[in-house]
Image (cartoon, grey):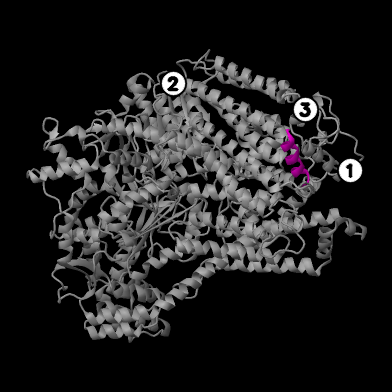
């Protein structure tokens, strides 16, 4: 009877394998675009939107005649917020479905999971979310903000515009807040803020009991310095955090909060009337007043419904996809190496005005926007900088300050400028 | 947008400026035009002169203009660069009002206007500048606003204005606030030391935040170093420090000397390597072969060699460091020059030290109590299903979630928040009661003597319910907003406060404790439940229908979970994963407290709540660690007291 | 399948059967799966034909996959699928451990995925350290001065911990440089944790659901601990890039995946034999006795706690080994893997496969995890229901949850029960009397004797 079982098992496996193999047949047309965003699990909350964004962009491009005379075919897989599964699905996309490019990932850990696979198989990944930097891969284009495109300008805004002298760095306990806060601590010290005026706290994902932490932050004001909160709190936890801020009557005048992970989507789960004036820093806000943005919002709402909002990572995909399309047309092929070469220097208009440029370090030059929360759950843009070139390795940590990424000239993402050698060609994961 | 239009506008302004100047008598519009570049740039660093110009202009309209500018009602018309107040009348149209006359000046589409958006920093500055106008304003609300503005951003000039306004203040409450603020400002900006010391003395024993926020900056110090054995006499020295002590390590002390240029720096590893590399000559550094330099010691020797040859800076040796440290005095000195003032501030602060600490503890205790009541509320349903009936219901968390979503749905239908909560509470009970009864009938009653399998089956229900919630409501967190009367917090003083919503949860927890006790001890149902739990066969032979009782008990426990869901949703968030956050803690609460006893559950919740806050207090920078250690503690606790805090007699854990 | 005269809820049965194995002087030895092999002349394999059948199937399966793989054969099965199969074998191994501890010993541990994860972490530390060391040594080779050991160490630390904002080696990495020590730790760390935890829990006589909740709490505490960056294991990011074996950069993943498949198959085979051996002898009878009625076994003079502790620790070690083989194939390990829900899924697999039979655990793990891959991979066709189209990505978990309830209610023997139908096993007519507190297990057959 064990034999029966094993035969059954073997047979079912074989069927699975063959169905997998059958879809691996390769043709030039259509051009295949892999979409690697979680559609289930904890990250589905954020990533499903990006999948829809990609489908909309591909649909629009197909209406405009496709690419290289081919239809673009999206290949959507669901890594289910399971980090090892990201690596597996990426391999499947590249080897079984033979996609030409992948747009995907949200969390840093999922990106780190995918990196070795993408590099091994020489794939191409567009990563659309703001992240902690300290990484540069030959095969990844980072269309979201590096710390110097979000965290540093926001801190400058705190220091200069709001006169903040004492900082509370609150974050969810994972890589992005840890690294970002590390960079900020070192940056603040370089700006003359003493160590005892920097309060750091890490909370778990989905944390809901904020009363003590908010009290702690309020108590920081006891020495008469202006306190400001820099929040890298992620996802759901923000709901409880802002509710507690409102309950304790912390107004943006007394203790301003600037968030790096709170966008229009997150605010839609909140009543914002008590939060007016708190801030967020992004490269894009839905309220940006340009024609391109109006068109984009209209197209998005037409596809997804009137009550849906747009956000920053969506713009990153918008720019990334369009740049990739242009680069493919320029190169005349979807071959990864040729497209990568063609990507450098690609320009595309931002939805917020101005032009994004792809730099040789695989980051974009984009403007940084700071918005104040309004009653209707949107952001009022109170500051917009010139385009800031993204920096893979921060200048504010001693180990990273000497590193530089330049894939075009140096062919190296981790180049030590001190002893003028390439530390490693592959990325660190 | 503003940024891109600015050059264009500047050009326009240049063209129009003579025209405007000619057409307009000097007034608020002209003044605004004069400062237009600054106002449009909208940066706190540069806006100062523009605000001062407006505030000092003496124009009667200045106050209104500044107030409306602060409220973001001030616009620039793109065609001619003139300033207007504007109000949105239609979808895309604005009615303009002249800044000087207050007359309506036509209607324009929204793309013909540029809104000025002063940021938070600028609004604060405008607020501070407005104080002089507002302190004697007839409207008490405006006067209060002025006091708030002073509290946020005090300036020396406010002191005089405030003193002037006190005598004419009609409202007793505002007058008291003004007098208090006057004393605070005197501490900061008073002319004579005596005046300031008196003001400080008047605040002895006052624990309010603004007092501490005023006193603490006086005690700010700077660390410096001076040659010799004594600190300079002309400084207000707070304390002298001994290098190597707790406050100042030798490393830091020497760093201070180096920064002041009083000593040679010690060389870093990187610098030493750079120096060695720079002196490589034919595979050798100062006669040492490069290939042997693969240990720190070898590099040290090679560097010493280099230094002795004069090819590199000599580094400070240990003896030199010692000598340098001995030859200097390290001290902290107050920025505040007056000894009398700093001493008074010290005295005032130390007088409230104990009081502040007590209040902090009280605040922490309130937080802990609140957390305990949340755990209790989440666990009380489980205390019935698990504690009384012995059924492991892993879907308990999902019942909490269902309650929260019920609250959300009701709010979509009934927009009045108070009413919707009143409807949501019984409705959530009804919904989860029904779900509980259905689950008991369909699944659990077949598994009463297979507890481990109940665990697995209800876990299956739990993942199915969770995914169903995702499919229906999406993955995004949904808003569940509390009514206005639950907004805000009960502020006892500046340190101790607790939000009303938490008080409501606490009350709700007490209510359900009472309800539970009443049902169990005073009703027929309670009697029958206890009978069925103790001995179902005997109960059945007494005419009790055990099936019905089991069903009702399970429904009751589930129903209470639903109500807990509404409460939890109000204070935190409504997502499909909400239940998961509470399930393990709830089981812990019941197990730690002692199964089958509601007082045990209460004790368990209290223990866990206070424990968690206590650990958080010890390690404020890492809340995650607090949760980890709390669970570890519970595991150990159960090892040594397997039946929980309040154990029922004759009952072993695991029965 | 025939069964031994093992423990039922009737006291005389218990005592007679247990005493029989105790003294080795039982009446006639039953022709059974878990019989007292030592007492009879026939060999272990002869007494346990299912072991041979299983190993044969496993060998055929491994060979078939190898032949069809990209790395060594025809290239019909993609490398990613070979990895999936390899990982599934590891899951089968941990399911065997779960079956031993739950199906045979009656301890519903919700912590075995924690041991699995710990094994993964232990091997992951070496993989990361060594891979990074090679990179750092390579890059420092270009430097004008030969690197000092401190420089190499700092370089590795910066590379590994740079992403989580630190640059020093935490104490737990003390042995990461040594493969033999880390390999030993794969066994020692989960084993020691299980030993200490089990000793505390069993000593206090925490049993049943309480023990389940306690093990779940342990898992949660461990996951939360690892989530912290301060724990020194890179927090939420965990250890990544584990599929790149140090020094084997030139070997394609297609080949490495086949090697790991072999390794996993070997471990599974050995694990199966070990489990079958443990449950076949006198030891097996005692632990089944503990499952059925702990108090009675204790009254018979057996140190129940010792037996439970042995099984708990042994299975933790097996889980650790499975994890150490799994994560180099998955490529990344992080605390989310250890979350309590993973351990509950493990119980689900075993329950669906059929408790109290080792091959049941293997079937359950393979069946559910592969089905799950199929449904969530988007390969399953949508199911149009007229007004609503069921998309399996959304509905798979609902289906799994419900099928789980159904299995518990209507098929407590799981898929393994189907084999009883094939081999014409029938329930004895017990005239309505039940089999005691835990009916789902293998006892039905055991009671037939």
How busy is the neighbourhood of tag 1: few (under 14 within 10 Å), some, or many (20 plus)?
A: few
Q: Secondary structure at mark 3?
A: loop
Tell me which numbered mark, 1 or 2, is placed earlier along the sequence.
Answer: 2
Tell me which numbered mark, 1 or 3, is placed earlier along the sequence.
Answer: 3
Please identify the dominant SS of the magenta region.
helix
Tag 1, which chain? C
Please name the residue that numbered disc 3 is placed on.
C40
Closer-to-camera residue (B213/A327) = B213
Marks 3 and 2: which is nearer the front?
3
Please name the residue that numbered disc 1 is placed on.
C433
Distance from label 3 to label 2 (Cα)?
Answer: 50 Å
Against B278, residue B167 (above or below) is below
The answer to whether residue B112 shows anywhere in this view is no
Question: Is there one chain holding both mark 1 and mark 3?
Answer: yes
Q: Secondary structure at mark 2?
A: loop
Please name the residue that numbered disc 2 is placed on.
C252
Q: What stretch of residues is rendered in magenta?
A: C281-293
Distance from label 1 to label 2 (Cα)?
Answer: 61 Å
Question: Is there one chain holding both mark 3 and mark 2?
Answer: yes
Q: Quadrant of residue B317?
A: bottom left
Q: Is C282 a magenta residue?
A: yes
Where's residue C238, x and y in %? 46, 41
Residue drawn where x is 60% and y is 51% of the image: C217
């Amino acid at each position: 009877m064990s034999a029966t079982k094993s035969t059954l098992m073997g047979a079912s496996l074989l069927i699975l394998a063959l169905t997998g193999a059958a879809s691996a047949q390769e043709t030039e047309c259509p051009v295949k675009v892999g979409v690697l965003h979680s559609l289930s699990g904890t990250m589905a909350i954020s990533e499903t939107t990006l999948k829809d964004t990609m489908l909309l962009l591909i649909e629009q491009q197909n209406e405009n005649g496709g690419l290289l005379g081919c239809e673009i075919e999206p290949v959507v897989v669901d890594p289910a917020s399971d980090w090892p599964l990201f690596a597996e699905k990426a391999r499947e996309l590249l080897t079984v479905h033979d996609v030409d490019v992948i747009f995907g990932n949200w969390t840093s850990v999922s990106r780190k999971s995918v990196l070795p696979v993408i590099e091994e198989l020489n794939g191409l990944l567009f990563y659309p979310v703001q992240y902690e930097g300290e990484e540069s891969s030959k095969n990844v284009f980072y269309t979201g903000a590096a710390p110097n495109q979000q965290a540093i300008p926001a801190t400058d805004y705190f220091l200069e515009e709001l006169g903040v002298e004492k900082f509370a760095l609150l974050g969810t306990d994972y890589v992005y807040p840890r690294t970002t806060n590390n960079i900020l601590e070192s940056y603040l010290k370089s700006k003359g803020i003493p160590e005892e005026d920097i309060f750091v706290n890490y909370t778990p994902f989905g944390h809901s009991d904020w009363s003590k932490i908010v009290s702690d932050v309020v108590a920081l004001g006891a020495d008469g310095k202006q306190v400001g909160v820099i929040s890298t709190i992620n996802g759901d936890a923000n709901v409880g955090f802002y509710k507690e801020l409102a309950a304790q009557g912390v107004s943006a005048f007394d203790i301003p909060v600037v968030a790096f992970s709170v966008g229009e989507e997150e605010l839609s789960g909140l009543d914002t009337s008590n939060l007016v004036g708190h801030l967020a820093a992004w490269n894009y806000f839905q309220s940006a007043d340009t024609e391109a943005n109006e068109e984009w919002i209209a197209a998005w709402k037409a596809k997804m419904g009137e009550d849906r909002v747009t956000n920053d990572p969506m713009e990153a995909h918008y720019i990334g996809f369009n740049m990739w399309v242009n680069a493919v047309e320029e190169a005349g092929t979807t071959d990864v190496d040729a497209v990568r070469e063609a990507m450098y220097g690609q320009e595309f208009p931002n939805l917020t005005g101005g032009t994004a440029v792809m730099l040789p370090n695989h980051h974009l030059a984009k403007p940084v926007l700071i918005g104040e929360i309004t009653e209707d759950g949107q952001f009022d843009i109170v500051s917009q900088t010139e385009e800031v070139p993204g920096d893979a390795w921060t200048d504010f940590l001693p180990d990273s300050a000497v590193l530089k990424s330049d894939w075009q000239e140096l062919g190296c993402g981790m180049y030590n400028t001190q002893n003028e050698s390439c530390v490693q060609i592959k990325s660190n994961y | 947008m503003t940024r891109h239009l600015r050059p264009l506008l500047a050009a326009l302004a240049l063209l129009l400026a003579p025209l405007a100047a000619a057409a307009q008598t000097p007034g608020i519009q002209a003044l605004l035009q004069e400062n237009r570049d600054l106002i449009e740039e909208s940066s706190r660093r540069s806006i100062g002169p523009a605000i001062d110009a407006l505030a000092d202009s003496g124009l009667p309209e200045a106050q209104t203009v500044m107030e409306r500018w602060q409220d973001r009602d001030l616009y620039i018309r793109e065609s001619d660069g003139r300033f207007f107040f504007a109000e949105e009348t239609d979808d895309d149209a604005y009615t303009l009002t002249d800044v000087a006359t207050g007359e309506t000046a036509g209607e324009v589409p929204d793309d013909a206007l540029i809104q000025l958006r002063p940021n938070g920093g600028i609004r604060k500055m405008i607020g501070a500048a407005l104080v002089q106008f507002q302190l004697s304003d007839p409207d008490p609300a405006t006067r209060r606003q002025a006091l708030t503005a002073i509290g946020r951003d005090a300036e020396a000039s406010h002191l005089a204005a405030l003193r002037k306004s006190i005598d004419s203040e009609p409202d007793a409450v505002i007058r008291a606030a003004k007098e208090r603020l006057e004393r605070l400002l005197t501490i900061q900006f008073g002319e004579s030391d005596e005046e300031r010391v008196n003001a400080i003395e008047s605040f002895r024993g006052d624990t309010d935040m603004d007092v501490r926020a005023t006193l603490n900056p006086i005690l700010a110090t700077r660390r410096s170093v001076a040659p010799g054995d004594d600190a300079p006499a002309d400084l207000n020295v707070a304390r002298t420090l001994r290098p190597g002590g707790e406050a100042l390590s030798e490393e830091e002390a020497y760093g201070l000397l180096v920064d002041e240029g009083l000593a040679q720096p010690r060389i870093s590893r990187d610098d030493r390597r750079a120096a060695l590399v720079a002196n490589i000559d034919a595979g050798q550094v100062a006669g040492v072969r490069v290939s042997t330099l693969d240990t720190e010691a070898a590099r040290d020797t090679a560097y010493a060699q280099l230094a002795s040859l004069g090819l590199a800076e000599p580094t400070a040796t240990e003896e030199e460091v010692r000598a340098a440290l001995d030859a200097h005095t390290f001290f902290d000195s107050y920025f505040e020059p007056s000894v009398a003032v700093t001493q008074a501030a010290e005295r005032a602060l130390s007088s409230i030290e104990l009081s502040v600490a007590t209040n902090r503890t009280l605040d922490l205790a309130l937080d802990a109590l609140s957390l305990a009541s949340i755990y209790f509320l989440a666990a009380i349903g489980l205390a019935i299903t698990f504690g009384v009936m012995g059924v492991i219901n892993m879907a308990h968390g999902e019942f909490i979630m269902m309650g929260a979503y019920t609250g959300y749905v009701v709010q979509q239908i009934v927009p009045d928040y108070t009413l919707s909560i009143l409807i949501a509470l019984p409705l959530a009970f009804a919904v989860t009661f029904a779900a509980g009864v259905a689950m008991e009938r369909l699944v659990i009653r077949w598994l009463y003597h297979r507890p481990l399998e109940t665990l697995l089956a209800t876990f299956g229900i739990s993942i199915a319910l969770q995914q169903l919630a995702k499919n229906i409501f999406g993955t995004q967190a949904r808003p569940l907003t509390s009514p206005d009367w639950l907004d805000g917090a009960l502020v006892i003083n500046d340190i101790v406060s607790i939000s009303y919503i938490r008080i409501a949860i606490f009350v709700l927890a007490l209510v359900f404790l009472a309800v539970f006790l009443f049902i169990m001890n005073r009703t027929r149902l309670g009697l029958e439940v206890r009978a069925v739990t103790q001995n179902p066969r005997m109960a059945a032979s007494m005419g009790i229908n055990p099936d019905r009782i089991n069903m009702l008990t399970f429904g009751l426990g589930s129903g209470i979970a639903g109500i807990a869901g509404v409460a939890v949703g109000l204070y935190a968030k409504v997502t499909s994963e909400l239940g998961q956050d509470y399930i393990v803690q709830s089981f812990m609460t019941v197990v730690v407290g002692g199964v089958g006893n509601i007082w045990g559950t209460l004790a368990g919740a209290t223990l866990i709540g206070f424990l968690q806050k206590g650990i958080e207090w010890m390690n404020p920078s890492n809340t995650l660690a607090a949760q980890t250690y709390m669970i570890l503690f519970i595991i150990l606790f159960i090892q040594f007291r397997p039946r929980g805090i309040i154990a029922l007699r004759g009952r072993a854990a695991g029965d | 399948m025939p069964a031994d005269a093992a423990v039922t809820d009737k006291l005389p049965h218990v005592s007679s059967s247990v005493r029989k194995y105790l003294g080795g002087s039982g009446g006639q030895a039953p022709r059974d799966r878990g019989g007292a092999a030592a007492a009879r002349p026939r060999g272990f394999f002869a007494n346990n034909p299912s072991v041979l059948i299983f190993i044969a199937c496993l060998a055929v399966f491994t060979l078939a996959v190898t032949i069809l793989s990209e790395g060594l054969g025809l290239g019909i099965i993609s490398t990613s699928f070979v990895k999936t199969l390899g990982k599934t074998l590891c899951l089968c191994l941990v399911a065997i451990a779960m079956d031993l501890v739950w199906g045979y010993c009656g301890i519903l541990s919700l912590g075995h995925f924690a041991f699995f994860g710990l094994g993964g972490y232990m091997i992951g530390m070496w993989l990361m350290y060594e891979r990074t060391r090679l990179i750092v040594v390579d890059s420092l080779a270009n430097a004008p001065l030969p690197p000092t050991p401190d420089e190499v160490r700092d370089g590795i630390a910066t590379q590994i911990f740079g992403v989580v904002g630190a640059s020093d080696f935490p104490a737990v990495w003390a042995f990461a440089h040594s493969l033999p020590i880390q390999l030993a730790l794969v066994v020692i760390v989960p084993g020691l944790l299980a030993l200490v935890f089990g000793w505390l829990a069993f000593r206090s006589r925490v049993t049943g659901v309480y023990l389940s909740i306690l093990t779940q709490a342990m898992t949660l505490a461990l996951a939360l601990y690892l989530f912290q960056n301060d724990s020194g294991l890179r927090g939420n990011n965990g250890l990544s890039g584990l599929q790149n074996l140090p020094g084997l950069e030139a070997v394609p993943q297609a080949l490495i995946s086949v090697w790991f498949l072999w390794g996993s198959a070997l471990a599974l085979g050995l694990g199966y034999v070990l489990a079958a051996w443990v449950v076949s002898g006198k030891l097996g009878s005692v632990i089944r006795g503990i499952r059925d009625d702990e108090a009675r076994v204790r009254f018979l003079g057996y140190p129940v706690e010792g037996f439970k502790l042995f099984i708990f620790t042994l299975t933790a070690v097996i889980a650790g080994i499975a994890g150490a083989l799994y994560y180099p194939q998955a490529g990344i390990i992080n605390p989310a893997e250890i979350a309590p829900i993973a351990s509950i899924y493990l119980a689900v697999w075993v329950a669906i496969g059929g408790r109290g039979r080792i091959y049941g655990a293997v079937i359950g793990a393979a069946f559910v995890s592969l089905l799950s891959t199929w449904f969530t991979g988007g390969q399953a066709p949508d199911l149009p229901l007229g007004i609503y189209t069921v998309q399996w990505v959304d509905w798979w978990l609902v289906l799994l949850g419900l099928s789980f309830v159904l299995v518990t209610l209507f098929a407590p023997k799981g898929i393994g029960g189907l084999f009883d139908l094939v081999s014409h096993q029938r329930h004895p007519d017990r005239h309505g009397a039940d089999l005691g507190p835990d009916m789902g297990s293998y006892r039905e057959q055991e009671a037939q004797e």
